[in-house]
Amino acid sequence: MGAWGYGIFDNDDVLDIRDLFRQLVREGLPMKEVTKRCVEDYPDPMNDVAVVLALAALQMEQKQLQPEIKRRALQMIEEKKDIATWNDPEKRKQALEAFRQKTDPLLAYLSEFERKEAVQKKTGIAAGEVFQIG
């Protein structure tokens, strides 16, 4: 695998996924099937940062971002998963933050405090609040 930059598509494997994804979309397959076929060659695709972020970006391009892909992508960005493996982790963080903001345009224009407040307003759950489901 070769990476030449810090962006989502600056990676050989991800470009292969993008090509296959776009081909399958042109063929008219449903998004769930497109996604499934794009990741079948990866042993653990939902834990591969490059794969998840590429799928999120491609699904957003089609305005069909699946909730699980979005959740996993945002989680990986928040956790800074694999960030230490980059030559310049700060540049990678900047690229990931720019991408994260695209997943929720409202958040792109808010400070960190305002983001937390917006999320609380949207979900009714405050940052750090513990709750039980079920």
Image: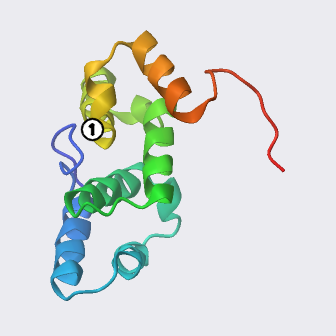
Q: Position of residue 62 (x, y in %)?
A: 22, 64
**Which residue in the structure is indicated by mark 1?**
99
Residue 87 at least partly seen: no
Taking 25 as reference, is 12 above or below it?
above
Using a 10 Å C-alpha cutoff, classify the residue at mark 1 as few (fewer than 14 neighbours), some (14 to 19) or many (20 or more).
Answer: many
Residue 7 figure quarter: top left
Dot 1 falls on a residue whose secondary structure is helix
What is the number of callouts on the image?
A: 1
Front residue of 76/63: it is 63
Residue 18 figure quarter: bottom left
Task: Left or right? Give the position of 108 relative to 121.
Answer: left
Task: Left or right? Give the position of 98 relative to 129.
Answer: left
Front residue of 33/132: it is 132
Taking 25 as reference, is 91 above or below it?
above
Q: Residue at x 40, y 55 (%)?
A: 52
Q: Residue at x 33, y 38 (%)?
A: 104
Residue 6 at least partly seen: yes
Q: Residue at x 45, y 57 (%)?
A: 69
Front residue of 129/85: it is 129
Residue 91 figure quarter: top left
Q: Position of residue 125 (x, y in %)?
A: 64, 28
Taking 53 as reference, is 99 above or below it?
above
Q: What residue type is disc 1 on?
A: Phe
Task: Left or right? Give the position of 128 relative to 88.
Answer: right
The color scheme shown is rainbow
Task: Left or right? Give the position of 122 relative to 66.
Answer: right
Q: Position of residue 107 (x, y in %)?
A: 33, 27
Q: Position of residue 129 (x, y in %)?
A: 71, 23
Q: Quadrant of the N terminus?
A: bottom left
